[in-house]
Image: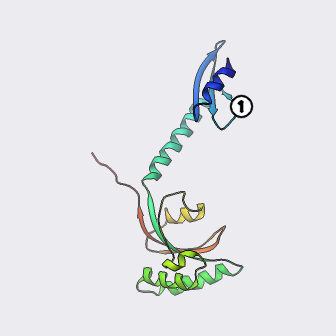
Amino acid sequence: MLKLLCVLLSLLPLTCIGFSFNGVSKVLVRNSIQSSQNCILTPPSRINSLRMNFFEDAFKFVTNMKKEASAKHILISGADAYQKLEMLKSELESATEISTAFSELAAKVSECPSAKRGGNLGTFKPGMMVKEFDEVVFNKPVGVVHGPITTQFGSHLILITRRYEGEDKKS
């Protein structure tokens, strides 16, 4: 019977089914990526944990769909990248128009193809950039140069130009 249930569940991407067998309650959790032999029986004590994780993840996903940001960056790689970016950041602190100065500097020194656009990365949502980049862009103040930040691509200075976090509907 369990084998038949697993085969039927293979048609669904993720399924959680509760059942009772000989007076013992179980929950069958099935991920369609797994083969039908790899169904997992979960005791009722873990059901709330599974439900909570699912709803937390769904809430984060829906909330992040409303968020977006625009940023510019300067990318430099190599052993002394961090020190170079520290010097560039101190130059930018004296600029009167930070966005223009950042774009001009990015066009001159950035190793990223976005240098042609003054380091402009356009608009993006959470999860579209590497984790370290996302943490800065979606949590730090807008209009300020942040960094140096190190990622798998090298070290960055980041200027967040805009952030949109969705509308709060008040009733």
Q: Is residue 166 visible?
A: yes
Q: Which residue is mark 1?
A: 38
- From the top left corner, tell me how far across and down residue 72 is, in percent: 49, 73
Q: Is residue 43 visible?
A: no
Residue at x 70% of width, y 33% of height = 35
Quadrant of res 86 = bottom right
Q: Is residue 149 left or right of residue 159?
A: right
Residue at x 66% of width, y 80% of height = 81
- From the top left corner, tell me how far across and down residue 150 is, in percent: 64, 70
Q: Is residue 75 left or right of residue 124?
A: right
Chosen colour scheme: rainbow
Quadrant of res 45 = top right
Q: Residues within 10 Å of mark 1 (few under 14, many from 20)?
A: some
Element at badge 1?
loop
- From the top left corner, tell me how far across and down residue 153 is, in percent: 65, 70
Q: Tally the marks.
A: 1
